[in-house]
Image (cartoon, coloured by chain):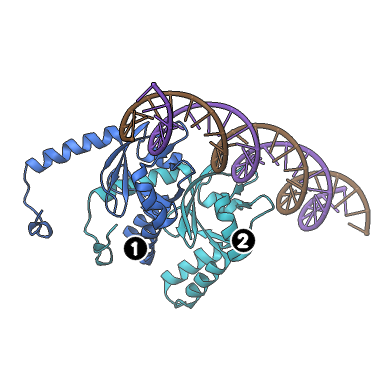
Chain colours: A blue, B cyan, C purple, D brown
Amino acid sequence: MFRGANKVTLDSKGRLAVPTRYRERIVERSNGRLIATVDRQDRCLLIYPLPEWEEIELKLRRLPTLNPLARRLQRLMIGHATDLELDGNGRILIPPSLREYAGLTRTAMLIGQGNRFELWDEVQWNENREQWLKADETAEPLPPELGSLSL
Amino acid sequence: MFRGANKVTLDSKGRLAVPTRYRERIVERSNGRLIATVDRQDRCLLIYPLPEWEEIELKLRRLPTLNPLARRLQRLMIGHATDLELDGNGRILIPPSLREYAGLTRTAMLIGQGNRFELWDEVQWNENREQWLKADETAEPLPPELGSLSL
DNA sequence: CGTCCGGTGGGAAAAAGTGGGAACGAATGG
DNA sequence: CCATTCGTTCCCACTTTTTCCCACCGGACG
C-alpha cells in the first residue's frame, strides 16, 4: 500500500524520480509498469500499478456504451490512460498532455492513496488542502455512509 | 487493448501516422486491417481492428429491420464503414468523406477506447472534454450501474 | 573527512514522424 | 482507340522527438 506525501520535481523533459521507498514495491507488484490517467473531479493525475488499473478498466468497459454518462467516464479515464515505466534511474516520464491537464510545473506532490498515487502541482495541492481544512470547520451534516465511521 | 490520448497530424494527403506503440498490436490482431466509421452522437470517427468490427456489424445486422432507430443505426454505421490499411510507414489514409464528417483539420486526437479508437479534431476534443468535466462536477444522480464503482 | 546513495541534468544514439517525389493506374476527352 | 491528365499509392530521405546512458552534485551517514 502507498502512503504519504512527497515533494517531487519534474525536470525539463518531464521526468519524475519516484521516491526510493516505493520503487521496490512497484517493481514486485507490476514489474515497474504503471498507468497514469486524469482525475475527473480535481485537476490531478492518478497513477496505478498496471494490475490495479486493469481491474478498473475492466469495470469501466463493462458499462453500457450507449449511456452518455458511462461514455463520458470511459472517454476521460480510459481515454487518458497512459503506460509509464520506471527507467534505469527509477524515474517515470509524464507525457505533455497529462502534465498540461494537471497544470504541473517543476515542483509537484506525489500523494500515496492506498492502491494508487495522486500527482498534484504543488501550488494547487496546498491551495486545496487549505480549503479542505476550512470546509471541515463548517461542520456540514454527515451523509449516512460516513456517520458510523470511527477513526 | 487500446488506451491513451495521442496528438496526431493529418498531412495534406489525409494520412495519419498511427503511434508505434499500437502498431504491433494492430498487425497481430488484424494483419494491419482496420475499419473506420462514424459515431452516432458525436462528430468523431470510430476505428476498429477488422475482427472487432465484424462482431459489431453482426450485432447491428441482427437488429429488427422494422425499427426506425435500428435502421438509422445500420445506415450510419455500416453505411460509412470504410476499410483502412496500415501502409509501409505505419500510416492510414482517412478518406475525404470521413474527414469532412468529423471536421478533421490538421491536428487531431486519437483516443484509445478498449477495443477501438476514437478520432477527434483536436479543437472539438478539447471543447468536449471541458464540458464533460464541468458536467461531472454538478454531480448528477448516477445510474445504478455506476453507483458502486470504486476507482 | 570520506564514502555511499539518491537525485538531477545533459548529451548522444536510435527511433519515430513528416513531407515530397516518382511511378503506377484509372478515367476522360479527343 | 489512343493519349493526356488527374488521382492514388508506394517509397525514400530528412527532421524532430524520444530514449537510453553516463557523469555530476549534494546530502547523509559512518
Q: Which mark is residue B27?
A: 2
Identify the residue position indicated by label 1 in the image.
Answer: A67
- Binning the other alpha carbons within 10 Å of mark 1 as few (below 14), some (14 to 19) or many (20 upward) gives few
In x, y percent, where is residue A134? 12, 38
- Residue at 39% from the left image edge and 43% from the top image edge: B127
Q: Is disc 1 on the same chain as disc 2?
A: no
- Amino acid on which the number 1 mark rests in the picture: Asn
- Residue at 55% from the left image edge and 52% from the top image edge: B21
In x, y percent, where is residue B25? 57, 60
Question: On the rendered image, what quadrant is the C terminus of chain B found in?
Answer: bottom left
Q: Secondary structure at mark 2?
A: helix
Quarter of the image where one finds residue A15:
top left
Q: Chain of mark 2?
A: B
- Residue at 64% from the left image edge and 56% from the top image edge: B86
- Amino acid on which the number 2 mark rests in the picture: Val
Residue A76 visible: no
**Mark 2 → mark 1, Cα distance in angstroms:** 31 Å
